[in-house]
Image (cartoon, grey):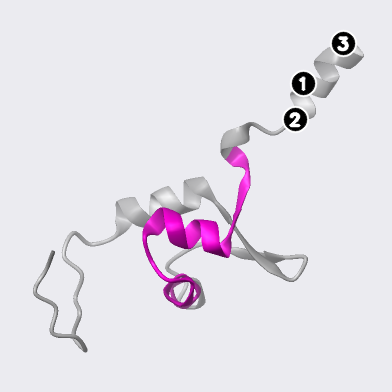
Amino acid sequence: MTAKGKHKDAAAPIGNRLLTLREAADVLRLSTRTVREYVQRGELEGRIIGGRWRFRRADLDAFFANAPRNWDFARKNYQGD
């Protein structure tokens, strides 16, 4: 295998780029605090790397896909949007 081909295989696709906490919150349209709460409850995958939260887009997509269609806001009087 050539050096060029080897380098190409080693590069991660742009779709696998890790997102920051702020970026993950923006994707999900949630606050950073809420994203951290979902991670702490084990409902969303995230890792602390170098002292900062990092998220894979695939994990955010899976979280969204598995979320209930109607959130239960027991502590809030939410009427829907």
Few, some or many residues within 10 Å of mark 2 (<14, 14–19, 20+): few
Label 2 vs 3, first from the N-terminus? 3
Does residue 49 appear to the left or right of 15 in the view shown? Answer: right
Q: Amino acid at mark 2?
A: Ala
Q: Residues within 10 Å of mark 3 (few under 14, many from 20)?
A: few
Q: Is residue 41 magenta?
A: no
Q: Which residue is mark 2?
A: 11
- 3 with respect to 76 (left or right): right
Residue denoted by label 1: 8
* Disc 3, SS: loop
Q: Which residues are magenta?
A: 16-38
Spot occupied by residue 40 in the image (x, y as percentages of width and height): 51, 77
Labels in figure, total: 3
Relative to 12, does residue 36 appear above or below in the rendering?
Answer: below
Disc on res. 1:
3
> In this rendering, is residue 20 above or below 73?
above
CA distance for labels 2 and 3: 15 Å
Would you say the magenta stretch is mainly helix, strand or loop?
Answer: helix
Disc nearer the start of the sequence (1/3): 3
Corner quadrant of residue 26: bottom left
Q: x%, y% of residue 60?
A: 45, 53
Quadrant holding the N terminus? top right
x then y, percent, for residue 5: 81, 14
Q: Residue furthest bottom?
A: 75
Q: Residue lying at the far right in this picture: please name it.
A: 3
Instruction: Please name the residue shown 56% across and 36% down the image.
Output: 15
Q: Tell me which amino acid carries mark 3.
A: Met
Q: Answer yes or no: do the residues labelled 1 and 2 have beta carbons within 8 Å?
A: yes
